Amino acid sequence: MDLQELLEIGQRERDRQQQKKTRIRCCTAAGCLSSGAAAVKNNLEAAVSAAGLEDSVEVCGVGCLRFCGRGALVEIDPNGILYEEVSPAQASGIISDLSEENKDREELPLQGDLNHPFFALQMPVVLENSGKIDPERIEEYIAVGGYQQLHHVLMEMTPSEVIEEISKSGLRGRGGGGYPTGLKWATVAKMPNGQKYIVCNADEGDPGAFMDRSVLESDPHRILEGMAIAGYAIGANYGYIYVRAEYPLAIQRLEKAIQQAKKYELLGSQIFDSPFDFKIDIRVGAGAFVCGEETALIASIEGKRGNPRPRPPYPAESGLWNCPTLINNVETFANIVPIIREGSDWYASIGTETSKGTKVFALTGKVSNTGLIEVPMGTTVRQIVEEMGGGVPDGGKVKAVQTGGPSGGCIPAEFFDTPVDYESLLKLGTMMGSGGAIVMDEETSMVEIARFYMEFCRGESCGKCVPCRAGTVQLHALLSKLLNRQATRADLEQLEALSYMVKETSLCGLGQSAPNPVLSTLKYFQQEYLDLI
Amino acid sequence: MQAIATETKTSKAKSATTKSIEGDKRIKLLDITMKRNHYRQDALIEILHKAQSSFGYLESDVLEYIARGLKLPLSRVYGVATFYHLFSLKPSGVHNCVVCMGTACYVKGSDRVLTALEQELGIHVGETTPDGQISLMSARCLGACGIAPAMVFDGTVTGKQEPEMVLAKVKAWRLGANGNSPMQE
């Protein structure tokens, strides 16, 4: 494979697509598939051939179309129509509506408003191809410029120039911690030459978060290309993607993508006839939340129990099989290609002083418009929840938004004008997390939510260190005592003291952050706790 | 604790039970998987996945077989099999019913769905009905938060579930089972 061939594949695919006047895009991400998207797509295909429109209409499966709460979604390109809650029976109606003379409005599904703030305020960078290309065909990824940045990096940049570019962009880890990505890459690159590894953390365990799943299901090649660029920059020739087993479709699409990339020699030995080799393997998790923690994840890839270990040494120095290992989250790798393509200055111009670029959120809970959104850093919580999300259905009142999953906290409604960036959220006592944003209304009891998360952490604690293993059990018992209205003021004081103890003495991130939902709700909704005494 | 107790019991009767998987066609599948992974010890989790998907659960003979194949101590194989939630050492029911207990589903009432199911089936989450028909489980998050509350019926994800809909589904399963074999109820 050389650049000429790559460009030709892209051109052939674009020519193929242009032969058809209309492209009907069916969302085939996991959310819509659960709402019958496969049958919708089949019926649309059947209706197209029944109407004899094969020459001008193409039905294709694409990645996430964002509005996950209203699946199955179908988009008509170039007409700019988005159909919501499409049932298989409505397929023929959609097709007959394409030809002007045959209008039968009654059979048509609901139409979505693409100018609604839910769509209008989005800024697709990570999700630029999501909902546009068929994730199961590498040709479509190549047709939108795929793998050209890998070529550019291999031919025209030195590894240190790549790291410099990523550092200048200001990209920070999207898994929640927000560690500067360029700095992490530089640390691994500085380690002595020898075996090094790239690991993509796709163990998206936070309940209520599905950004990484959507990216993997909608645009898997972008992750492969990002990982290969990272491999070149730090001197690694092997990468692992650690995916949770709960995402079978993501695993299947990744496997397919790796196969196709190998076939086109975009992964493997001497990529683009350069001396650079890069291979990627998938490792499937087995349902342990703690494996999202990097040292536990390494143990799991090595086929062991997912127990974390103390750091330092950090994985950058001694990770997988004691070799220097670069671990980044899915969304972080998804940002690499656009940064290389558009330049670090462009990327750094998006967002706030300390948090650059965009962030993908999974907006769920008691909110009218649930789905996947990508907004520039610095967008306010109010814009996300009220404008894009449309507030609580049936006119209820929003009470708080929970971010960061079991490690995070909540943002009460009075702080909704806070811009979303790493520092502002930390100041409020929560965190960016991987990007789950769960809206809660007046009916939601915050103490119950705190207990819900504590139950989660109690079950997911690996049991290695005492503060986390025993502390989460005690915290859960205290919260249950409160909810059973048997607690005293002394119990409440103990709850707070024990929370700080667990936070400060646990071994890994799971235990250190497990009390956050309690502390955060105690801070903002203390009255709810007092009312239970 | 219970699992460990049954474990020791079955290993005492080893000579008798090892034969039960000898010549089993599914063992061949396991062999192929181990071979494809070059008997590498770090492929343990992949191989356990394969074993569970072909046997339905990880019985102690299978764990021993894998330990021997990968030249790992049985304690290590057992340790890994019990650490991860998705591996089960007990057979599951004919039908599987998984309630997603992720935050988005919880906020939208999946706890009510779970309670209704527990009452209807007379078992707790993580258990199988005494007739071996239905297993009730919960998941941390299916990533299908857009269609909360979500459930998985025999591997099919279904969204926007209410207690009544779920109970109807489970009742239909039971009726189906009644038609084929008498049930004690």
Image: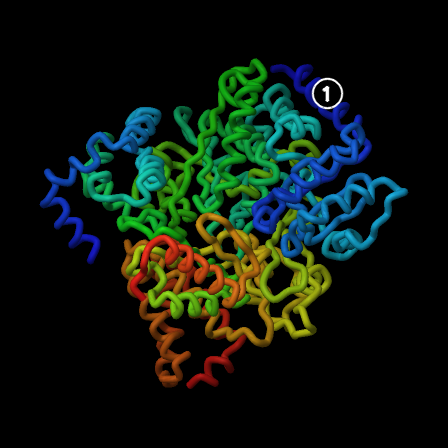
- Viewer-proximal residue among A487 and B91: B91
Residue A531 drawn above or below residue B32: below
Left or right: B31 in relation to A515: left
Q: Which residue is identified by label 1?
A: A12
**Residue A125 higher or lower than A164, as above or below:** below
Please provide percent x and percent y for residue B77: 24, 41
Assign the C terminus of chain A to one quadrant of the image: bottom left
Residue A120 located left or right of residue A69: right
Q: Residues within 10 Å of mark 1 (few under 14, many from 20)?
A: some
Side of A26 where A507 appears, left or right: left
Whole-percent x, y for residue A355 in the image: 62, 50
Q: Residue furthest right?
A: A101
Q: Residue at x 61, y 58 (%)?
A: A363
Q: Position of residue A393 (x, y in %)?
A: 67, 68
Quadrant position of the N terminus of chain A in the picture? top right
The answer to whether any part of residue B104 appears in the image is no
| Picture colour scheme | rainbow
- Number of marks present in the image shown: 1
Residue depicted at 34% across the width and 65% down the height: B124
Displayed quadrant of residue A261? top right
Residue that appears at 62% across and 29% down: A137
> What kind of residue is marked 1?
Arg
User: Residue A423, located in which quarter of the rendered image?
Assistant: bottom right
Q: Chain of mark 1?
A: A
Q: Quadrant of residue A345?
A: top right
Is residue B61 at all visible to an observer of this figure? yes
Q: Secondary structure at mark 1?
A: helix
Give the x, y percent position of residue B139.
43, 56
